[in-house]
């Protein structure tokens, strides 16, 4: 069998290292944006849920006030 030796120059190794660093930075940016997007969606969902609960409780309190005021209103 013949063995072929491939000689690499310093510039080739430097370019490979730069490309690997660029790829790893791109992957890191993608992961950070994914995590921040998930966190943002979770916070938005929680605030919408809080608004829904506040509206439901407000409606319940208003209905309860009407029931109590009608229960003690003997003139109507």
Image (spheres, helix red, strand yellow):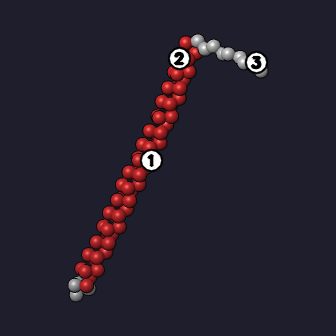
Instruction: Kindly indicate the quadrant of the structure image that contains residue 65.
Output: bottom left
Which residue in the rendered view is the most extreme toward the front?
1
Quarter holding the N terminus? top right
Task: Name the side, left or right, on which 67 lies relative to 29.
Answer: left
Q: Position of residue 59 (x, y in %)?
A: 33, 69
Residue at (53, 29) in percent of width and height: 23
| Tag in front: 2 or 3 | 3
| Tag in front: 1 or 3 | 3
Instruction: Give the residue number, with chain letter if any, for mark 1.
Output: 38
Q: Position of residue 76 (x, y in %)?
A: 26, 85
Q: Secondary structure at mark 1?
A: helix
Instruction: Give the residue number, with chain letter if any, for mark 3.
Output: 2
Q: Of the residues under marks 2 and 1, which one precedes in the sequence? A: 2
Q: Secondary structure at mark 2?
A: helix
Tell me the CA gap for discs 2 and 3. 29 Å
As displayed, is residue 54 above or below residue 61? above
Q: Secondary structure at mark 3?
A: loop
As displayed, is residue 9 above or below residue 38? above
């Amino acid at each position: 069998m013949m063995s072929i030796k491939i000689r690499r120059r310093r510039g080739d190794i430097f370019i490979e290292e730069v490309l690997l660093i660029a790829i790893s930075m791109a992957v890191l940016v993608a992961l950070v944006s994914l995590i921040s997007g998930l966190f943002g969606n979770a916070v938005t969902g929680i605030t919408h849920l809080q608004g829904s609960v506040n509206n439901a409780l407000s409606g319940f309190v208003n209905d309860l006030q009407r029931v109590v005021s009608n229960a003690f209103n003997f003139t109507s």
